[in-house]
Image (spheres, grey):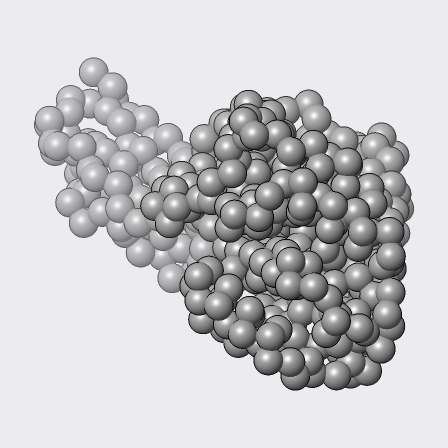
Amino acid sequence: MNPHGADIGGAFLASCLAKATIVLGFAGILARIARRSSAAFRHSVWVVAILAALALPLLEMSLPAWHASVPSRASGLWIRPHAVGEPYTDLADLPAMVINAAIAMPTSETWVPLLLLGWSTGFLYFTLRMLAGLARLMRIEAHSELLRDADWAQTTATLSGSMRIARSVRLVESQNEAAMPLTWGLFHPLVLLPAGARSWPELRRRIVLTHELAHVARRDWLFTICAEIACAVYWFHPMIWLAARKIREEGERAADDVVLLTGIGAPDYADQLLRLAASLSNSGWSSSVALALTRRSHLERRFTAMLSPSLDRRSLSPRTRTLTCLLVSLLLIPLAAFRLPGQNLAGRFSGTIFDPSGAAVPNATVIMTDARTHKIAMTTSDRRGKFLFSALEPGDYELEAVKRGFEDYKAQQILEAGKDAAQDLKLQIAPVTYEDEVVAQGTAKGLPPAEPGGKTMRVRVGGDLQAPKLINKVQPVYPEGAKAAGSQGTVILRAVISMDGVPLSLRVMNDQIDPELARSAIESVSKWRYTPTLLNGQPIEVDTTVQVNFTLLP
């Protein structure tokens, strides 16, 4: 696994875990406060928490990032700190400081991929378990027969109308006489009944249908599947399993409340549930992804709730649902956009430093300065001219490359979270200016100083540069006519040093200078000789600037 990808994946997983914990913790506190409220309200609290936990990863990937400005020590558990450089395969190419940084890195490079592998394994297991339960339901449906009974059909139609169920609900009869009534399906809901259900008395038929159709009206099966998906995503989080269990428990109690609100007495309802639980059985994995009428582990708490006359049994109004969704959205969107310090990873920033001939520039220092925090990260190029930063927070940076004898390279670089960036650099030689002083006795006429023109020499150098050296210099002579006229100033000459070290193409860059001073400067500089400029061992022609200062002393 790519270590950098593991860092990003680990930080993303840690962020989702932390934010889901906040959401689930808040839901637990709210459900505890609302323990005297209706089961429908508590059920909605846990449903919203599960849906929020599922939406967090998707929102975090799609919303613009709101980065944390306060550093967190906990982020160091998931990512490497700012590294001076990523270790290359050939460690002999690296400066000592890079090798030391690689050795001192925390062990996240090893255990973060292992954690991601463990999460993937658990996610796959629980997803397959859920799919196996759905497949079992499909097999049960395939081996069941459509229940064609006038009394059942009439009761179903009446209850569906009273609950405003617009979808067509199918009743099927299992071949198993001990099959527990189950409900599943979203667009075409299905209610499974045991063999022999045709002979049930009217009270039992009405109780079972009211309970199961209450699940259909409330879309409880959809929320149950969402809870199963959340358990697969956050299988390692105990609070997600608590939320999934609470969704089932509160959903059953809310359906019980619907039954009791139709006028069926609590003792009669409890008696029928007890009889069904004693004679029927759940169907393993299939009941985990379907809504079973009774679960023996829930019966005692359900009996206590249904026999308590003081409990609130009202359903949620559409207005309450709308306001709840709006409030949750206002809280969830900022939470999803917020990035923990451990997530403020940019993709790798790398590049190669070249000279104009295409040769690599080794041992150049590359500096990245965060424009907002002024934090500095530094690395050096290897003998191939390559450099690499592996852990930088996203933001605006000033990129600087420095090597002795070369002009500093500066540029702006924007790094985005989780995205790789690369930029190749080309260094230029540091400005080289030759200056000569010519002094003579005389009275200055007071001419305005000459304005410098042209540019100082910038030789395009590579990784191996030998700059030109002046080996033969002819001193300029102060012209008599210029002395008599009191002329003084600086002559700025632009020239090309040939591959033989001879100044060529001499020309004056400031036209306002005295012509005699310019002529004297050209005559002397044309006789200067240099060592050839070598770029990677080969002589090249370079530009240069020579300043000759003519000064009259009083």
Q: Total marks drawn?
A: 0
Residue 238 lies left or right of residue 249; in this view the side is right
Residue at 42% across, 41% down: 324
Please identify the quadrant where the C terminus is shown.
top left
**Rendering coords of residue 343 (x, y %):** 62, 40
* Residue situated in front as seen by the camera: 364 or 78: 78
* Residue situated in front as seen by the camera: 185 or 115: 185
Please identify the quadrant where the N terminus is shown.
bottom right
Residue 377 lies left or right of residue 552; in this view the side is right
338 to 201, vertically: above or below: above
490 to 259, vertically: above or below: above
**Rendering coords of residue 319 (x, y %):** 34, 46
467 to 554, vertically: above or below: below
Residue at 18% across, 49% down: 511
* Residue situated in front as seen by the camera: 434 or 120: 120
Residue at 67% across, 47% down: 269
| Residue 242 in view | yes
Residue at 31% across, 56% down: 507
**Rendering coords of residue 86 (x, y %):** 76, 45
| Residue 135 in view | no
**Rendering coords of residue 268 (x, y %):** 67, 46
* Residue situated in front as seen by the camera: 463 or 295: 295
Residue 370 lies left or right of residue 207; in this view the side is left
Residue 375: which quarter of the image?
top right
